[in-house]
Amino acid sequence: MSNMMKRATGQLFFPDIGPGNRFLPPEAHLPQLQRALLDWFAAHKRPLPWRASYSPYEVWISEIMLQQTRMERGVTYFKRWMKHFPDIQSLAAASEDEVLRLWEGLGYYARARHILSAARLVMTEHKGIFPSDPARIRALPGIGPYTAGAVASIAFGEKLPCIDANVERVLSRVFNIDTPVRQKPAAPKIRELALALVPEGRAREHNQAMMELGALVCAKKPHCGRCPLAAFCVGRNMGVADKRPVPGKKAAITPAVTATGILRRNGRIFLQKRLSGGVWGNLWEFPGGRVENNERPADAVIREFMEETGFAVTPVCKYGIIRHGYTTYKIAMHCFGLKLTESPCPPAPFPPPAHLASASSWRWAAPEEIADLPMPTPHRRLADMVSSAYAAH
Ligand code: SF4
């Protein structure tokens, strides 16, 4: 057993990795590991916009924005956001529609609604100053343990860990964690290791260095040849780096077929505002809904319009099918042009009866107004598709 790594009595046995390769068990060499990581970060960190000042407001917005978002896309959205809302005061004074419109395309819109609520709370409860105490940060809407740790450590230097998917990947490889990282027993172990690694007084740099390393070097395909932690990495030295992290159970993807319609009257288009819950809460959309089994999409849009708005409609054209994936759904949205079946137009049926209520508000919008309203991505694509079709005529 001498040349094999095993877990026997909680002690690790490491293999002989050959001449010239010096392996340093990470637990026994924390100061060297921390130093190697910090030196690497100082030399390789990307010049991201929030790294210019590390203001709590910018760190907070960047951390929320980057969840589930690629860095290049996050940076584009961040710069645009800061132009519109350069500080908490301007954000707190904005309308929800303005905030959601700027967020449009990033998905998980509850994040944007929470940002607005938190900004208003900072104005009323904290005199406009972002709190530095981790417990107070955690108490703001939409801030979980990850974001609280990130803001407290990166903006205020608190000795707290910051664990995102990049950090989970690095730790699972360096410490060769061989069970799924988001489940027990690995999850608490990851938290413990992440905290133990934070060097005194260097939380800001260390936490960013871990995330940066996961993004640039210890990526899905690890680039161990240029990694500052190679000498300490159990996964690499055991030859199992590409098998870490061990994947957890994946959420099943649910396909869904929907039908949606654009109803015009006097040059305006009917829109409704979704109820506040759910991933698309408070966004504006064209009415529609799921196509039932054995139902034709054209029949579904007629039924959905009657159920949701009380309007009797007839399809006059089909624009096409828009395909879109979000959370665990993969939708195929059949898109129709509609006209009212009855003429003249019946009075607007809102508010709908309580048992049918699927929207909190509605409007007949001019095409130029639609550009300013926040919409789910597939509905924005439909709006763009229809407006360019009209522009072409
Ligand atoms: S040595 Fe390889 S596997 Fe280990 S942390 Fe570095 S890049 Fe990741």
Image (cartoon, grey):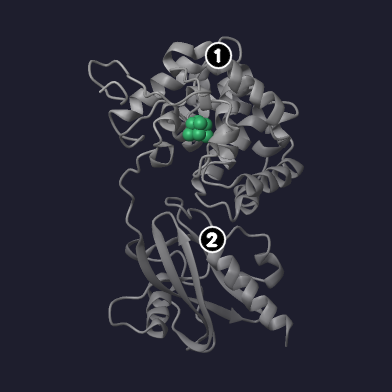
Depth order, front residue of 359/36: 36
The amino acid at mark 1 is Gln
Occupied quadrant, residue 115: top right
Residue 347 location (% of width, % of height): 51, 76
Tell me, for residue 376, which label it has, or none.
2
Secondary structure of the residue carrying tag 1 is helix
Q: Which mark is residue 32?
A: 1
Which quadrant of the structure image shows residue 389?
Answer: bottom right
366, above or below 54, in the image: below
Q: Position of residue 202 (x, y in %)?
A: 61, 15
Q: Is residue 115 above or below residue 309?
A: above
Q: Nearer the viewer, mark 1 or mark 2?
A: 1
Q: Amino acid at mark 2?
A: Pro
Secondary structure under the numbered disc 2 in the rendered image: loop
User: Looking at the rendering, in which quadrant would you find the N terminus?
Assistant: top left
- Of label 1 and label 2, which has the lower sequence position? 1
Toward the viewer: 174 or 258?
174
Label 2 Cα crowd, 10 Å radius (few <14 / some 14-19 / many 20+): many
Q: Residues within 10 Å of mark 1 (few under 14, many from 20)?
A: some
Residue 113 drawn above or below residue 11: below
